[in-house]
Image (cartoon, helix red, strand yellow):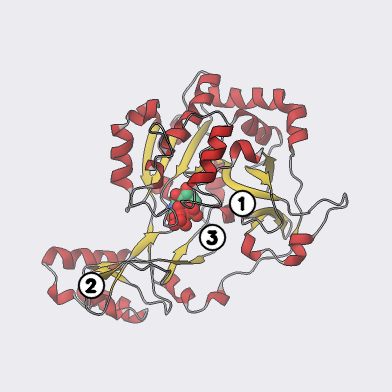
Amino acid sequence: MTLEAAKAKLEKYGQSHVLKYYDELSAQEQAELLEQIDATDMSILAAAMNPDSLPKKGVISPIPCMDLDEIAANEKEYRSIGIDAIKAGKVAAVLLAGGMGTRLGSDNPKGMYNVGITRELYIFECLINNMMDVVNEAGTYFHLFIMTSDKNNDVTINFLKEKNFFGYKEEYIHFFKQEMAAATDYEGKIYLESKSHMATSPNGNGGWFISLMRAGLMDLVRENGIEWFNIFAVDNVCQRIADPVFVGATIAKKCFVGAKVVRKNAPDEKVGVMCLEDGRPSIVEYYELTDELMNAKTEKGEPAYNFGVILNYLFEINELERIVKEELPLHIVEKKIPYLNDNGELVKPEKPNGYKFENLVLDMIHQMSSCLPFEVVREKEFAPIKNPTGVDSVESARELLKKNGVVL
Ligand code: UTP
């Protein structure tokens, strides 16, 4: 992009300050900045000034869930369907590891966090150990795609290589990078993180399938006959991945997506809950849950919106290819964004100081025509590590790991 074209683009979106230090930069830095300006979608930034313009939820109603009793009654059948699918190479896992993990506050990617006490036990290692249970049961490895971002790609790959992928076969592991989005102050002005770079942040976990396609990995997917992607978060150290019973149940029920859910531990627990929205599967985020929905009851007198998602979904790939052209809603999230102050010095804020712009995987559920909410036991499968201490923390995850027999 030429300087003239960059000026015109920035002016159109009220971002001319991005070139403030342009004349001080080396030729290479100038070229990098122009390239970044060219690649950045600035049309989304206007939403920062007008959050009310973001799409609103439709009519919410309860969705039936496959609960633990129903699963137990059919476990043998589901397990056998799931194991057959895994043996046939139809199931792959996708690890979403592009997030910044700002709440945990570690400089390294979250997966490199050591949750061990008397020995080293990294988050990535816990996840791979869980996958190895299935590898051993099915007698075959399954493909693992790992999504990183510009901010953590190299360090993630180097770490996993150095650790020999914790025993997972390297030829089954494939990396791809997600896209980045500009980060702004509360007035929608893009922050600079250096004189030659706009501040950016990974664009949310909702872009994972587009990024996987753009990375050219679909050839490998098709050549290997993969039909299902089990996507999962990096920070839930207890979750079962490519869980044969979950896979088998989703296939048996002929659903395009399966969603692992846990029974909420309180009506106001901070998890998104499964529901129908205008008759299609959907998820209401905890901050969107009105008191009326929180206290609604089914005919049996049970809470109507009682199943929270744990970010472990099984997507059917043809259906993903069908929905990929549809736009996902934008979410604006307050974050701590390091920025250059008026004196050109880098400031690392202690409190949120602006917005990042994200698409979320949970919105993909609403694009699918059918979904199987599949209950799992929270003490066995839900140990997210978001914070150093307190709720959803290293401490609480360690407790659950111990309860599940993992030596720390
Ligand atoms: P979180 O919503 O917990 O976000 O991600 P985060 O960025 O990791 O952590 P905070 O909010 O800054 O503390 C849930 C899952 O989605 C992935 C994360 O890596 C995690 O597995 N994710 C999130 C991405 O892969 N990309 C993103 O842009 C955001």
Marks 2 and 1: which is nearer the front?
2
Residue 206 visible in the picture: no
Query: What's the distance in space between the residues labelled 2 and 1, CA to CA?
Result: 43 Å
Q: Residues within 10 Å of mark 2 (few under 14, many from 20)?
A: few
Which SS class for mark 1? helix
Label 3 secondary element: loop
The residue that label 3 is drawn on is 328
**Residue 391 horizontal/vertical position (percent):** 56, 52
Q: Is residue 232 above or below residue 141?
A: below
Identity of the residue drawn at 32% across and 28% down: 164
Q: Nearer the viewer, residue 394 or 97?
A: 394
Is 77 placed left or right of 338 in the picture?
right
The amino acid sitting under disc 2 is: Glu
Q: CA distance from mark 3 to mark 1?
A: 11 Å
Give the quarter of the image for residue 37.
bottom left
Callout 1: CB less than 8 Å from ligand 1? no
Callout 2 secondary element: loop
Residue 30 vertical position relative to residue 283 in the rendered view, above or below: below
